[in-house]
Amino acid sequence: MFLDILIAMLWSISPFGEAKFGIPYALLNDINIYLAFVLCFFANVLVFPIMTFFLDVVNRYFLKWYHYKKAAIFVGRRAKSGAGKNVKKYGFWGLMLFVLIPLPGTGVYAGTIAGYLFGLDRKKAFMANSIGIFISCVIVWVSTLLAMGSFN
């Protein structure tokens, strides 16, 4: 059980799944439904400070190298184009709406990058990401439970 919890949390931190994958993994491996939600949500929230540190420190250092810079510009453009109109026009609310959509490419990684690129206040960006993640987790959690037939 501990290993399944750890794997679910790692999926929730991973840019390949986030909580959109961590929650279903946990529920399908018979982890308590409330524990799965809470742990995957908090693991996904941890991405914001990690990404902020990465963008402030590591990213600035690696931008000196051509291949990294080319890849970073590609990722930045994707995040900006996905969230750009909403974040630019609505700020906090636009970022929150972008992050809460439980689809690939709309999670906290893209939300943190978009907030960084558009110069949103860190506290507001963190709150927008956290609220968006929470709503996204609720959608994924309820959908998974309904699909599993656990709401009988």
Image (tube, grey):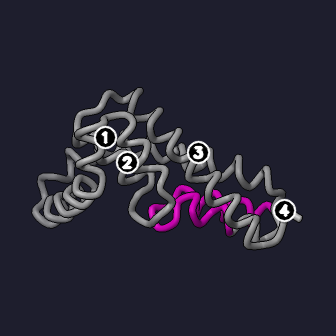
Q: Is residue 18 visible?
A: yes
- Circles 4 and 2 in contact, beta carbons < 8 Å: no
- In the rendered structure, which disc, 4 or 1, sits on the residue that comes first in sequence? 1
Q: Which residue is mark 1?
A: 115
- Residue 42, how many percent across, how many down? 62, 44
In the foreground, 145 or 47 = 145
- In the rendered structure, which disc, 4 or 3, sits on the residue that comes first in sequence? 3
Amino acid tagged 2: Gly
Specify few, some or many for label 1: CA neighbours under 10 Å numbering under 14, 14-19, or 20 or more.
many
Q: Is residue 53 visible?
A: no
- Stretch of the chain drawn in magenta: 1-24
- In the rendered structure, which disc, 1 or 3, sits on the residue that comes first in sequence? 1
Q: Which residue is mark 4?
A: 151
Query: How far apart are the two marked residues, 2 and 3, measured between alpha carbons?
Result: 13 Å
Q: Which-is-in-front pick, marks 4 and 3?
A: 4
- In the rendered structure, which disc, 2 or 3, sits on the residue that comes first in sequence? 2
In the foreground, 2 or 142 = 142
Specify few, some or many for label 3: CA neighbours under 10 Å numbering under 14, 14-19, or 20 or more.
many
State the mark number for residue 111: 2
Query: How far apart are the two marked residues, 4 and 1, measured between alpha carbons?
Result: 37 Å
State the mark number for residue 148: none
Q: Which-is-in-front pick, marks 4 and 1?
A: 4
Indicate the secondary structure of the residue bearing disc 4: loop
Q: Which residue is mark 3?
A: 134
- In the rendered structure, which disc, 4 or 2, sits on the residue that comes first in sequence? 2
Amino acid tagged 3: Phe
Q: Is residue 23 left or right of residue 83?
A: right
In the foreground, 93 or 55 = 93
Q: Does 141 appear above or below 128?
A: below
